[in-house]
Image (cartoon, rainbow, N blue to C red):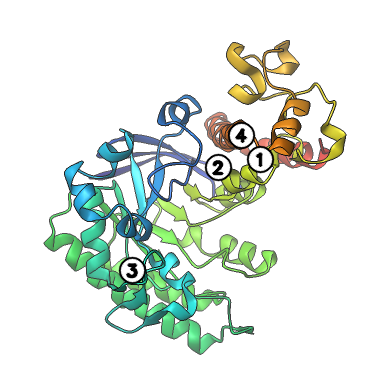
């Protein structure tokens, strides 16, 4: 089941406000989706995710296939019951993870032969196998198996001919994914993925082929795979608004706060990225006024929270009141610096909570500005604030 309702559009850009109804609930768009690769968003309890405003999270087909495996998932009725998350879930097809195995995999028309990175077993992933695994996972949004077109191969930029070959196979795999999805009578929604590398005309050809299959939703894949930032932004500005206006649009694996706001302006409804959680574990904190490196010595005696405007548990504590509004219950930068230096588990837990809260709150502010008709003013203020620095 999928129903997408377009509520409002922004006259100054391609930005849009909508709602996405899925089998496990309603999602307000534009939305950021926290990544829970192995069935958990690292270091964060499901209750905390709900409290910070997460509406939909990701799981990864490839990794959950490796561990714990389909039989365990079947016994729990799918991923929702296994990880105790009752809101919507989107699962990646496993294509990116198979692509990232490099020399450990061999791609053919039928699918991908590879060695398990867990125990070395010889395995095979095809569009049909991916659909079978995702049906067991019972994810609300299922992604077609695609080949992620690399930006470079062996140090050389992917040629147009190579990108075309990859895109055309992904298009054929889209049809096979759709046919298997239907055969399995999966009650959820299957998205097609636009490929084509950095070649705009190939992106358009890919989309045209997918439109003929009439998917319930569409994604832009093959970005943030090593290309220069200006080329990624070029594809972001070219492709999303070409996708059907009456269906959800998903930009896969992107990115920074600036990328999200730009992506919304380019017509994107859904985002995911490991950046807020991965950077949190490495001591990089996203704030309204730029990025903060908590490992820097200057924070050793700083009594301020990460972000004086933030109401997350790390910054505002139990009160839920920001520092700027008189709250003093949150954890200081000095304490967070201390936790990081000592390798204490609480450190990355709190930084992860903050970064995810920041991303989710940013998207809430984007939605509010779209509702109020002030998105262009919001973008200008956002850029000014982020450039100010912490």
* Camera-nearest label, 3 or 1: 3
Q: Nearer the viewer, residue 322 or 69?
A: 69
Relative placement, left or right, of 69 versus 338 is left
What residue is rendered at 59% in x and 61% in y?
237
Answer whether residue 276 is visible to the viewer in this image: yes
Q: Please give the residue where the numbered disc 2 appears in the rendered image.
A: 10
Q: Please give the residue where the numbered disc 4 appears in the rendered image.
A: 358
Residue 243 vertical position relative to residue 137 in the rendered view, above or below: below
Residue 144 vertical position relative to residue 160 in the rendered view, above or below: above
Query: In the figure, residue 79 lies in which quadrant?
Result: top left
Sequence-first disc among 4 and 3: 3
Sequence-first disc among 2 and 4: 2
Answer whether residue 13 is visible to the viewer in this image: no
CA–CA distance in space, label 3 to label 2: 26 Å
CA–CA distance in space, label 3 to label 1: 32 Å
* Camera-nearest label, 3 or 2: 3
Dots 4, 3 in contact, CB < 8 A = no
Dots 2, 1 in contact, CB < 8 A = yes
Residue 63 x/y as whole percent: 37, 57
Instruction: Check disc 4 and report its element: helix, strand or loop.
Output: helix
Sequence-first disc among 3 and 1: 3
CA–CA distance in space, label 1 to label 4: 20 Å
């Amino acid at each position: 089941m999928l129903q997408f309702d377009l509520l409002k559009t922004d006259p100054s850009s391609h930005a849009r406000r909508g709602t996405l109804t899925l089998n496990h609930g309603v999602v307000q768009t534009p939305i950021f989706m926290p990544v829970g690769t192995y069935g958990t968003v690292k270091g964060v309890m499901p209750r905390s995710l709900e409290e910070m405003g997460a509406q939909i999270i990701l799981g990864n087909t490839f990794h959950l296939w490796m561990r714990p495996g389909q039989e365990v998932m079947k016994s729990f009725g799918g991923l929702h019951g296994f990880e105790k998350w009752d809101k919507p879930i989107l699962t990646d097809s496993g294509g990116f993870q198979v692509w990232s195995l490099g020399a450990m995999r061999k791609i053919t028309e039928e699918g991908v032969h590879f060695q398990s990175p867990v125990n070395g077993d010889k395995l095979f992933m095809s569009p049909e196998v991916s659909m079978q695994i995702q049906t067991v996972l019972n994810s609300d949004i299922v992604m077609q198996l695609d080949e992620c077109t690399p930006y470079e191969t062996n140090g050389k930029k992917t040629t147009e001919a190579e990108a075309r070959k990859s895109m055309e196979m992904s298009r054929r795999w889209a049809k096979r994914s759709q046919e298997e999805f239907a055969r399995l009578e999966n009650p959820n929604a299957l998205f097609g993925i636009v490929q084509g590398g950095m070649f705009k005309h190939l992106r358009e050809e890919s989309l045209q082929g997918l439109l003929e299959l009439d998917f319930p939703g569409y994604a832009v894949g093959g970005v943030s795979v090593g290309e220069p930032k200006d080329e990624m932004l070029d594809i972001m500005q070219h492709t999303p608004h070409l996708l059907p206006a009456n269906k959800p649009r998903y930009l896969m694996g992107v990115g920074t706060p600036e990328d999200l706001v730009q992506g919304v302006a380019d017509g994107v409804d859904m985002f995911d990225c490991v950046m807020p959680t991965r950077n949190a574990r490495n001591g990089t904190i996203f704030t309204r006024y730029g990025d903060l490196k908590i490992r820097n010595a200057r924070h050793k005696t700083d009594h301020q929270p990460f972000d004086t405007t933030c109401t997350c548990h790390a910054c505002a504590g139990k009160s839920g009141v920001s520092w700027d509004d008189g709250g003093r219950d949150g954890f200081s930068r000095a304490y967070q610096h201390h936790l990081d230096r000592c390798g204490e588990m609480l450190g990355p837990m709190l930084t992860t909570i903050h970064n995810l809260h920041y991303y989710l709150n940013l998207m809430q502010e984007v939605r509010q500005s779209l509702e109020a008709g002030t998105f262009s003013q919001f973008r200008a203020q956002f850029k000014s604030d982020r450039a100010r620095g912490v």
